[in-house]
Image (tube, rainbow, N blue to C red):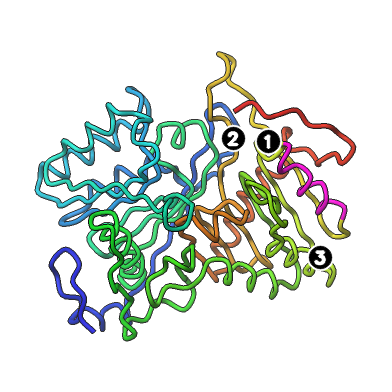
Amino acid sequence: MRIRLHGVSLLFLLPVFAFANTTVEIVQSVPEQTKLALPGVRQAKEVWPEMIGNAKSTIDIAQMYVQSVKDRSIEPVLQAMEAAGNRGVKIRFLLGSGMVDNDKETFDRIKAIPNLSFALYDISKVTGGIHHAKYFIMDGNEIFVGSQNFDWLALDEIHETGVRISNAALALRLETVFMHDWNFANSGKWGNESVPATSRGPSDVELVSSPDSLNPKGITSGIKTLVSLIGAAKVSVQVTLLDYTTSVYGGGKPWTVIDDALRAAAKRGVKIQLLVSHWNTTKSEIDSIKSISLVPNVEVRINTVPDLPGGHIPFSRVVHSKTMVVDQKIYWVGTSNWSKGYFDATRDIEIVMKRPDLASTGEKIFQTLWTAPYSVPVDVNKSYPAPVK
């Protein structure tokens, strides 16, 4: 099968994908003046400008929204993009349509970059959801997927986890999702994009996507993979999330697909540790984490990153990572919060790494959060106030 991305035929590149090496780097973002950084793990504010600066021909970016403040870490990222456009790199920027007015100045600045094409992606009328994925693709060979939004807060004041990967087959898979969404954003119609059957990705690193209904052919389901990983766990499952809930927004029957999988794992003796952010204490969500915390072999802790001495910064100082470590062997890093809408209606991307060395790094990041002085067990008898965001 022949498909064209950036005008380059992929038919002749497929044998390279089948045998290409895979280089993986775990990348963090950590709120300033905390002790949550894991030594030896670089931060996105270092990695993003480096990746953009190294791009030779193409950069594809998909983000939920953009937001910048001068003199913060997003500025070198924007400057690197401007430099890339000026040296002839073709840039495509796919942005969720719902938050264009969030920072009009930055939006206009990005649109003005030479050799950059922009598209607004709206799937609300199709699924009722949004574009929530956050990723980069460089030169068809390197990708970054993580919880970091294109936002100065995500680089400087929020706990985030991402992964940088060099592998042409995985880049092709993500590029196929990008093209599927890019074409819809530009035409309002879905194309017939698919991953060539002859393109084989690495056996130990997999890319999965949500929702199933919008996945191109050849892209694996996020929720099916997640439930399968939990179902196969034998010893431990360690989860870090912004939000975990069985509630369905707008009402309706509780969504228990993941909850059932975790309870079944705990019942067979798997130790479940679930760490959520203090934003997970809203009235519609707190009952879910209280309920699962009562299950034997399940522990739930709530992390509240303290404000800086100078005062509260809205929508910051929070754990926004979405990760899972299974049996100290498998590491899941992605963009989905764990509730129905993120898997059924919202575009999200996850990376599944079946490598103990990467899982070890993931567990150390998890333990740093789990043992932080501001991570405390959920109290089933406490009436939690609405979180300050």
Rendered location of residue 247, percent (x, y): 70, 50
How busy is the neighbourhood of tag 3: few (under 14 within 10 Å), some, or many (20 plus)? many
Which residue bears the numbered disc 3?
266
Work out which quarter of the rendered image holds the C terminus and state it.
top right
Judge left or right: residue 177 versus residue 92: right
Residue 293 lies in the magenta stretch: yes
Instruction: Name the amino acid type tagged 3.
Output: Ala
Q: Is residue 20 above or below residue 311?
A: below
Instruction: Name the amino acid type tagged 2.
Output: Val
Residue at x 73%, y 67% (from the top left corner): 261
Tell whether label 1 touches label 2 (CB within 8 Å): yes
Residue at x 39%, y 37% (from the top left corner): 99
Judge left or right: residue 52 versus residue 43: left
Sequence-wise, the earlier of marks 2 and 3 is: 3
Magenta stretch: dominant secondary structure: helix
Q: Quick one: SS at disc 2?
A: loop
Which residue bears the numbered disc 2?
318
Which residue bears the numbered disc 1?
278
Residue at x 64%, y 26% (from the top left corner): 388
Rendered location of residue 271, percent (x, y): 79, 62
Sequence-wise, the earlier of marks 3 and 1 is: 3
Tag shown at residue 56: none
Q: Is residue 20 above or below residue 55?
A: below
Residue 228: quarter of image: bottom right
| Region of the chain picked out in magenta, as a range | 283-294
Q: CA distance from mark 2 to mark 3?
A: 27 Å
Judge left or right: residue 217 versus residue 313: left
Q: CA distance from mark 2 to mark 1?
A: 7 Å
In terms of depth relative to the viewer, which is nearer, 23 or 130? 130
